């Protein structure tokens, strides 16, 4: 290098600015509204059949695995179809507390209200059981986030063949709103962060019905489908303070080259050749990709912009149109005005980051629908035994007790080998989760931006 020492220093400084960006450090922990998660921490989802569907829990796992691939969490779905707060209490030690959870979210109430107009005695039972559940969990070190019961869709219920009383159809959604309001107040009293899934489901449904009177995300009136479950997942993430973008790359002219300012990643090998800008970007995260059957809700919620923004901005370009390639794949063409304002790359499913995230989602979909669902269905044996024992203890008629005792004996026999099979299923789910984290590790990618005629 020729020139004075000062000139050589300035040239070196310019090259440094052009090739090395500012970057947020890789995530060492995840900050939530009510807690902090770090590697090896455990998140448990307590619930009934809506959690047993293994949908909103899968979408939340997808978010964490791709957004924070360096922070390896353990996830445990603890939902069982038909459960009430009382049922969750019976399995709490083995199914929840034994996991040494760091965060527990609780979605119950749909069954607790008993599918009838408001009944003070039924509500009192729910209050007592939910209070005991919260108090038991408060003896652990876990952060606890109660979730409001989800929506009962009376319009969808009327379209089904199942007979329900008109009073129930008119009131049940309001009953669930009442249960959720009590629960959120109880959470506030205990300094817990609560999650509201009821409001977004209702509000989005009402908005969609302005154009389609029969629109629903809950075809059977109770169990949200994929679109509804994505609404639930986004509410879970938003209320726990996890809304935000993935990365941002801003290129600005500097002398005869460019310099990069980057969030959540690094840029290296930045150079201009014959008007073409090239660099290598290594992100710390992948975008949150959701399954194709959630597309309607994804658009309604603007999931990409709100939770998964990958900004790309280039200033100082000559007027014209520019083609962006990543690893040799043409992503799209943009005008110099669009690039100066910024484009959001999470909107393009053909980026290598989106493709990699989609592979994670697909693999987790298989894990959830097969291994995790089998694990949760396995717990029916335990739940059936607990309920039959309770019914027997409450019965007084000798003949009735005789029949119930036989049922208890049958359920006890079904429990043979329960723990061994449970341990096997839990180990399989954990091993598959480890594979997902390996699959989600970000890779370097070469970006090429050139003007096109």
Image (cartoon, rainbow, N blue to C red):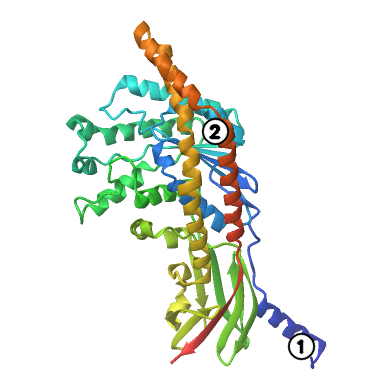
Q: Please give the residue where the numbered disc 1 appears in the rendered image.
A: 7
Choose the circle earlier in sequence order: 1 or 2. 1
From this viewpoint, is residue 106 visible?
Answer: no
389, 289: nearer the viewer = 389
| Residue at 45%, 22% in the rendered image | 410
Seen in the picture, residue 279 relative to 435 is either above or below; the reply is below
From this viewpoint, is residue 307 visible?
Answer: yes
Q: Where is residue 226 in the image (x, y as percent from the top left)?
A: 37, 51
217, 192: nearer the viewer = 217
Q: In this view, does 187 lie to the left or right of 142?
A: left
84, 264: nearer the viewer = 84
| Residue at 43%, 28% in the rendered image | 85
Compute the Cα span from label 1 to label 2: 67 Å
Residue 59, label in figure: none
**Mark count:** 2
Quarter occupied by residue 174: top left
Seen in the picture, residue 432 relative to 184 is either above or below; the reply is below
Q: Foreground mark, 1 or 2?
A: 2
Say few, some or many: other residues with alpha carbon within 10 Å of mark 2 (under 14 / 14 to 19 / 20 or more). Answer: some
Q: Is residue 163 left or right of residue 426?
A: left
| Residue at 70%, 78% in the rendered image | 16
Q: Where is residue 299 in the image (x, y as percent from the top left)?
A: 35, 60
Q: Position of residue 428 (x, y in %)?
A: 58, 45
Q: Where is residue 413 in the image (x, y as percent from the top left)?
A: 49, 24
Q: Please give the residue where the numbered disc 2 appears in the rendered image.
A: 95
- Say which quadrant the C terminus sits in: bottom left
Q: Label 1, secondary structure: give it.
A: helix
Q: Label 2, secondary structure: give it.
A: helix
Q: Is residue 238 left or right of residue 167?
A: right
Seen in the picture, residue 62 relative to 121 is either above or below; the reply is below
């Amino acid at each position: 290098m020729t020139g004075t020492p000062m000139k050589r220093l300035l040239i070196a400084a310019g090259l440094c600015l052009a090739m090395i960006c500012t970057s947020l450090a890789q995530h060492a922990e995840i900050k939530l509204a009510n807690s902090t998660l770090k590697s090896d921490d455990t998140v448990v989802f307590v619930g009934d059949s809506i959690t047993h569907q293994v949908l909103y829990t899968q979408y939340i796992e997808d978010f964490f695995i791709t957004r924070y691939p360096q922070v390896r969490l353990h996830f445990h779905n603890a939902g069982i179809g038909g459960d009430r707060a009382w049922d969750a209490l019976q399995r709490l030690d083995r199914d929840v507390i034994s996991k040494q959870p760091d965060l527990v979210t609780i979605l119950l109430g749909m069954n607790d209200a008993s599918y009838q107009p408001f009944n003070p005695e039924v509500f009192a039972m729910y209050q007592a059981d939910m209070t005991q559940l919260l108090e038991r969990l408060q003896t652990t070190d876990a952060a606890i986030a109660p979730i409001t019961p989800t929506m009962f869709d009376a319009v969808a219920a009327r379209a089904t063949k199942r007979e329900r009383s008109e009073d129930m159809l008119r009131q049940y959604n309001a009953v669930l709103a009442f249960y959720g309001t009590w629960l959120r107040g109880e959470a506030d009293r205990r300094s817990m962060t609560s999650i509201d899934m009821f409001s977004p489901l209702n509000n989005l449904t009402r908005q969609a019905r302005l154009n389609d009177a029969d629109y629903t995300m809950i075809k059977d009136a109770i169990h949200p489908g994929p679109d509804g479950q994505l609404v639930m997942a986004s509410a879970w993430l938003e209320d726990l303070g996890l809304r935000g973008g993935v990365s941002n790359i801003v290129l600005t002219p500097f002398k005869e080259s460019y310099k990069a300012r980057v969030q959540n990643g690094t840029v290296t090998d930045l150079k201009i050749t014959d008007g073409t800008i090239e660099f290598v970007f290594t992100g710390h995260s992948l975008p949150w990709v959701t399954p194709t059957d959630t597309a309607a809700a994804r658009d309604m919620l603007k999931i990409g912009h709100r939770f998964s923004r990958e900004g790309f901005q280039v200033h100082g370009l000559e007027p014209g149109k520019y083609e962006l390639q990543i690893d040799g794949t043409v992503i799209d063409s943009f005008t110099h005005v669009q690039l100066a304002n910024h484009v959001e790359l999470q909107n393009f499913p053909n980026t290598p980051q989106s493709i990699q995230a989609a592979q994670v989602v697909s693999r987790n979909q298989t894990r959830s629908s097969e291994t995790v669902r089998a694990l949760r269905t396995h717990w029916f044996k335990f739940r059936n035994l607990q309920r039959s024992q309770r019914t027997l203890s409450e019965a007084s008629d000798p003949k009735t007790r005789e029949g119930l005792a036989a049922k208890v004996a049958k359920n006890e026999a079904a429990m043979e080998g329960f723990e061994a099979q449970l341990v096997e299923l839990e180990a399989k789910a954990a091993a598959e989760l480890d594979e997902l984290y390996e699959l989600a590790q970000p890779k370097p990618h070469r970006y090429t931006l050139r003007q096109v005629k």
